[in-house]
Image (cartoon, rainbow, N blue to C red):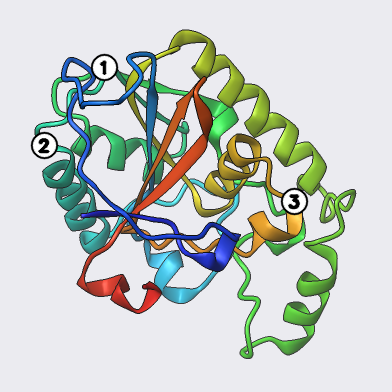
Amino acid sequence: MLRRSISRIGLLGLCLLLTPGPGSRVSGQAPATLRIYLARHGQTDWNVERRMQGGTDTPLNATGRQQAAKLAERLRGIRLDAVYSSTLSRSRETAEIARGPVPLTSLAGLGERRMGKFEGRRVDASDPATAAEYGKRSVDPDDALDGGESLNQFFERVRTTLNTIRGQHSAGAILIVGHGGTNRMILRALLALTAERANAIEQANDELYLIEIDAAAAPRLWKLITESNLKDL
């Protein structure tokens, strides 16, 4: 089931929603609604090791491929008009597994934030000095992390790419398979979040969000609730 997203990003209320394909009509629903299903790529070995992946092209592991297959099951019966991924293997492979017969478009603009000197490194208690430096620098909106990408650059790249996608779809349903950071920026752009609120979002590798957009109301964010994230309720 899909439930309205929780207070982590300041949205209130939990309501059940199981959306049909765009060819179906629900009573009281405006016909020109765009539904963006937003998934994160499946797990990689670097996710397990808690290494910063950034623009490094890491593949899915066995668990990641299982998560992608589960995503395909969850989307079964929903008529998608298009599927988008980044050009990185972990995103593209997840989308390939999940998309069924729907065409896939891979866009470099949906790639993860390039993390410069921190790519491949762990920023946790195993390396306290690196963790402290990353914690300070990663939230500076103009710090490009020594050859990487600043938050401002990252947000503008993702927002520009999202606007291009939306220019192709005024209504209907699409799937975007992004990355943890990329999906934060997508939600930041769609929901007009502050950088601080967007950075507080933690989407797991197997979590699915839905954003509904129409002219009649503010965008609505929903989250698929499963046994693994019941604690979020």
Distance between the alpha carbons at the discs numbered 3 and 1: 33 Å
- At horizontal 59% and vertical 35% (from top left) the residue drawn is 190
Is 3 left or right of 193, judged from the image as shown? left
Q: Quadrant of residue 192?
A: top right
The label shown at residue 103 is 1
* Secondary structure under the numbered disc 2 in the rendered image: loop
- Quadrant housing residue 233: bottom left
Tell me whether the residue at label 3 lies in contact with that at label 1, contact meaning CB atoms closer than 8 angstroms. no
Q: Is residue 58 above or below residue 31?
A: below
Q: Residue furthest front?
A: 28
User: Is the N terminus in the top left, top right, bottom left or bottom right quadrant?
Assistant: bottom left
What whole-number distance in Å separates the C-alpha atoms at marks 1 and 2? Answer: 15 Å
* Whole-percent x, y for residue 121 in the image: 63, 70
Tell me the kind of residue under disc 3: Thr
Looking at this view, is 116 or 193 the one in front?
193
**Residue 76's mark?**
2
Looking at the picture, which amino acid does disc 2 mark?
Answer: Arg
**Callout 3 crowding tier (Cα within 10 Å): few <14, some 14–19, many ≥20:** few
- Name the residue furthest right: 142
- Residue where numbered disc 3 is placed: 194
Whole-angstrom CA distance, mark 2 to mark 3, is: 34 Å
In the rendered image, residue 19, in percent from the top left (x then y), is placed at 22, 36
Q: 142 or 185: which is nearer to us?
A: 185
Q: Against 99, is 154 above or below?
A: below
User: How far across and how far down the image is residue 31, in percent?
Assistant: 32, 14
Where 205 falls versus 88 (above or below)? below
Q: In the figure, is residue 56 to the left or right of 192?
A: left
Residue contact between numbered discs 2 and 3, judged by CB atoms under 8 Å? no
- At a point 57% along the width and 15% down the height, the residue shown is 164
Q: Looking at this view, is 223 or 132 the one in front?
A: 223
